[in-house]
Image: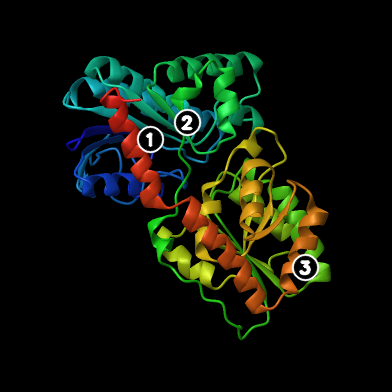
Amino acid sequence: MCGMNLLIISQYFYPENFRINELVADFIKRGHKITVLTGLPNYPQGKFYHGYGWMGPWKEQLFGASIIRVPMLPRFSGTWWQLFLNYISFALVASICIFWRVSRKQSAIIVFQTSPATVGFPAILASKIIGVPVFFWILDLWPESLRATKAIESLFLLNAVNYWVKWVYARCEILFISSRSFSKSLKLQGIQTDKIKYLPNWIEKDYEAHQSICKKKELEYFKIVYAGNIGVAQDLPSLLKAASKLANCLPEIRWQIVGDGRLLSWFKSEVSRLDLDKIIEFSGQLPANELPKIFDKADALLVTLCDDPVVSLTVPGKVQTYMASGKPILAMINGEGAKIIFDSGGGFVADASDVDHFCENVIKLASKTTEQRKNIGEAGRKYALKEFDRKKILDRLERIIEKSLNNEQ
């Protein structure tokens, strides 16, 4: 099939760090023409990035793609009502822009759906106006994640969101899921099995050829690094309990927290209150290309999620990134993500919120030699290269879209 004209709708895009950036860059190299309908970058800090604001820019060329940006409210400090306005403002303004800023010469629409699922509204509207199918990539389940993080507690509102999401999904050609565990939820919403396709997060480009450094350090510290969002789902209270407990029995442990999020201020204040300032370091939000250097200096990489059946369905994107870095993983999670780490042999897994077991795992890993930790990390990397290869996953995405457009089975 000749190169496709693809409209990609995503609330988030470069310079925000999401895998949709790599998808666009890759598909441009494959000969497809890409238009991205997106917002003004403000994630996760809650304020517009330097060079962006109420005066635009509204049009850009990035990675060879045409970028159409729309006015929207930023996340600000991330309270529930600020996030609501952030989500709704993008969805509404993007929907209006469909009428006069987006070319009708499109082959298909791809939706990148982390939170929020409101990105589905402009996509379905564009589908009706342009007359092309929607391919929807689900990385976060709605309304389940809203319920799990208590972003919405009203049963009436949760049912309304559920009805809305079901309406959107029913109008999509294909639903791609980043975790196999999402399948059950979609089937309960009446989605046919043949419309559901597995499309996991892939290894990011910076890690494809990266070889981790594993050598004896001058300082005899055991460094554990966490990189990513700092929010409700990450179960920060359990992490603080673990850090406090380990500070007494393993004083050489140091923690480095890289990232930003709604609970960062609270997290910092709790670290001070518990007198953990000397062992927990906050590095803030860093560019993605700086993370490999951070990981090289780590002895282990940390992933945590709260003890909730819905949250356990999710595979955090950092799991693939961690595994590809070639460093051992220390996890306190349930479900699909835990299974991947366990199957790979790339780390130690404790159940979500099981602080005692997690601490035992930290002590166990810290007691191993540098060479033994290197072998654990390499096992994870080998698994990731096999299961989450970027080219193979994007080949599959491209193939499924092309077959669908050609009405092939």
In this view, which residue lies farthest toward the bottom?
218
Q: Name the residue beneath numbered marker 3.
A: 363
Q: Residue 126, how many percent across, how many down?
A: 28, 21
Nearer the observer, disc 1 or disc 3? 3
Asked which quadrant contains residue 57, the reply is top left
Q: Name the residue beneath numbered marker 1.
A: 11
Image quarter hosting the C terminus: top left
Packing grade of label 3 (10 A; few <14, some 14-19, many >=20) is some
Callout count: 3
Image quarter hosting the N terminus: top left
Question: What numbered label is drawn on residue 218?
Answer: none
What kind of residue is marked 2? Pro
Q: Residue at x 58, y 64 (%)?
A: 379
Relative to 215, does residue 150 appear above or below in the rendering?
Answer: above
Q: Name the residue beneath numbered marker 2.
A: 116
In this view, which residue lies farthest toward the front?
409
Q: Which of marks 2 and 3 is nearer the N terminus?
A: 2
Q: Which of marks 1 and 2 is nearer the N terminus?
A: 1
What kind of residue is marked 1? Gln
Q: Residue 32, how many percent across, how many down?
A: 21, 40
Q: Residue at x 56, y 31 (%)?
A: 182
Choose between 350 and 121: the one closer to the eye: 350
Choose between 101 and 141: the one closer to the eye: 141
What kind of residue is marked 3? Ile
Asked which quadrant contains residue 113, the reply is top left
Nearer the observer, disc 2 or disc 3? 3
